[in-house]
Image (cartoon, helix red, strand yellow):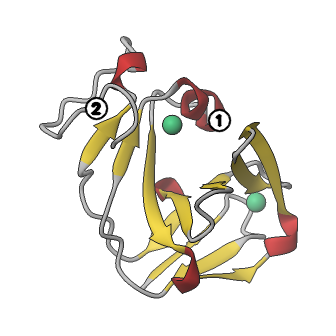
Amino acid sequence: MIKGNCLCGRVKYEYSVEIDEVAVCHCDQCKLAQGTAFATNAPVDASKFKWLEGEDNLTAYFSSANKKRVFCTTCGSPMYSQRTDLPGTIRLRLGTITEGKIPEPHYQIFCKSESQWLVLDIEKPRYEDNKA
Ligand SMILES: [Zn+2]
Ligand SMILES: [Zn+2]
C-alpha cells in the first residue's frame, strides 16, 4: 500500500499495490514541470489508484497534445502525468509519496537532455530517448 499527498495536503491518494517500476526522467519538460534536475516517476495501474481527497483540486496542463501533467491547484505539487492514448497508466511523481516502499530506480530516460550541473551517479540502464 502506497499513500501520498501534495504539499498543502488538500490532495491525498492511495495505491493498493506495490510500486514495481521507477524511472528517472531527464527530459526538458520534466525539468520545467518539477523545477528539478530530473524527475522520478513510477508508472502505476490507474485501476488500483484512488484519490482519497481533493481530486477536484487538481489542474491538468497539457504539455503535449496527448499528455497532461496534473498538479495541485493550491500548492502546485506535481502529482502525475498521463497520456491520453494510455489511460490505464498514471505516471506518479514519487516525491508525493508519504507512506510505503519506493524501490530504487530501474532505468533512466531522455538521457540526451540530462543536466550537466547535477549528475546522477547510479548504475542503471540509460536510454537516450524514451524506453522502447
Ligand atoms: Zn496542495
Ligand atoms: Zn520527462
Which class describes the residues within 10 Å of circle 1: few (<14), some (14-19), or many (20+)? Answer: some
Quarter in which the N terminus is drawn: bottom left
Per the image, the residue denoted by label 1 is 33
Q: Quadrant of residue 102?
A: bottom left
Which class describes the residues within 10 Å of circle 2: few (<14), some (14-19), or many (20+)? Answer: some
Residue at 36%, 42% (x, y): give it. 24
- The reply, left or right, for residue 92 in relation to residue 81 is left
- The reply, left or right, for residue 131 in relation to residue 57 is left
- The reply, left or right, for residue 8 in relation to residue 50 is right
33 lies above or below 106: above
Residue at 67%, 75% (x, y): give it. 12
20 lies above or below 76: below
Residue 127 is tagged as 2
Position of residue 68 measured from the top left corner of the image (x, y, whole percent) = 71, 49
Residue 5 is tagged as none
Q: Are marks 1 and 2 in contact (CB under 8 Å)?
A: no
Amino acid found under the numbered disc labelled 1: Ala
112 lies above or below 10: above
Amino acid found under the numbered disc labelled 2: Tyr
Quarter in which the C terminus is drawn: top left
51 lies above or below 26: below
Name the element at disc 2: loop
- The reply, left or right, for residue 93 in relation to residue 40 is right
Name the element at disc 1: helix
- Asked if ligand 2 lies within 8 A of label 1, the reply is yes
Q: How many marks overall?
A: 2
Q: Quadrant of residue 38?
A: top left
Residue at 77%, 42% (x, y): give it. 62
Position of residue 107 measured from the top left corner of the image (x, y, whole percent) = 26, 44
**Residue at the limit of the structure toward the left, as seen here:** 123
**Residue at the limit of the structure toward the top, as seen here:** 116
Instruction: Give the foreground label among 1 and 2.
Output: 2
